[in-house]
Image (cartoon, rainbow, N blue to C red):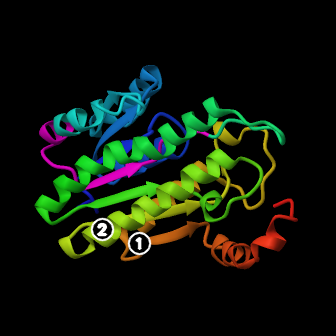
Amino acid sequence: MPAFETAIVVGASSGIGEALVKKLAAEGTKVAAIARRESELRALAQSCGDRVFPFVHDVRNFSEAPVLFDRICAELGSVDLLVYNAGVMPRVEESEYNFEKNRQMVEINLLGAMAWMDPAAAYMEARRAGTLCGISSVAGDRGRRGNPGYHASKAGLTTYLESLRNRLTHRGVRVVTVKPGPVKTAMTDGLKMPLMISAEECADGVLSFAKSSTTEGYVPAAWGPIMFAIRSIPSVLFRRTSI
């Protein structure tokens, strides 16, 4: 028996999401794969046989999320796991202050997660069972100088997931926050970052957390002590660094 009979992966057409869909399907899970790019979704579904069900959706169309969630529940029969993986990180120059980029990041990285997790949380609370998993980031642990909008969107997602966890933990629902470091995807193409891992390695870490009793953690685990040290730097000193 698979760990999850049914699952939804939001942000499934490439990178971490694609790897998650393939791994879940290989375990025997029926997966609703959600993404904006139809051709990539169709190709993914075809490569996974009859376990993957593609649904084209732009996460910025917030009002569509609860309707589509209900449709997926009806088609799959249930939803045991929802993973919100959709995210963007446009390049931001050192002295660039671009509201449109910031809005895009907040809409996709944070508000889209709320639009999907709210109906899923209500559904799982009523069933007294299920797992919600959000892909946050080490970038949300501290307000670093490089991309303020991205850091803020991931910090918001981390706090939102913690709030859901505090609300749902005694109602049979697990809420898992996974904070990857840099991952080799189209979003990080051309960037040189420390401890960078493949999308497949990240997906393995995400599923490990989703299946375990741990509700929050870093992928890879080495980021745990690193981020503890970074969070411990006093703000008056942190602002003088180039981290």
Note whether 41 is above or below 23 in the view shown.
above
Q: Which mark is residue 81?
A: none
Q: Which quadrant of the structure image shows residue 127?
A: bottom left
Could you say which disc has been placed on residue 215 in the image?
1
Categorize mark 1 by other alpha carbons within 10 Å: few (<14), some (14-19), many (20+): some
Give the residue displayed 20% in from the left and 71% down from the top: 172
Give the residue number, with chain letter if any, for mark 2. Answer: 174
Magenta-drawn stretch contains 202: no
**Do residues under tags 2 and 1 come within 8 Å of each other at their CB atoms?**
yes
- Residue 21 shows up from this direction: no
Answer left or right for 134 relative to 201: left
- As for residue 83 lying within the magenta part, the answer is yes
Residue 80, by quadrant, is: bottom left
Magenta region, residue range:
72-88
**CA separation, marks 2 and 1?**
7 Å
Residue 94 lies, with reference to residue 180, above or below; the image says: above
Instruction: Pick the residue in front: 173 or 13.
Output: 173
Q: Measured along the vertical axis of the image, is residue 208 above or below residue 152? A: below
Q: Position of residue 224 (x, y in %)?
A: 63, 75
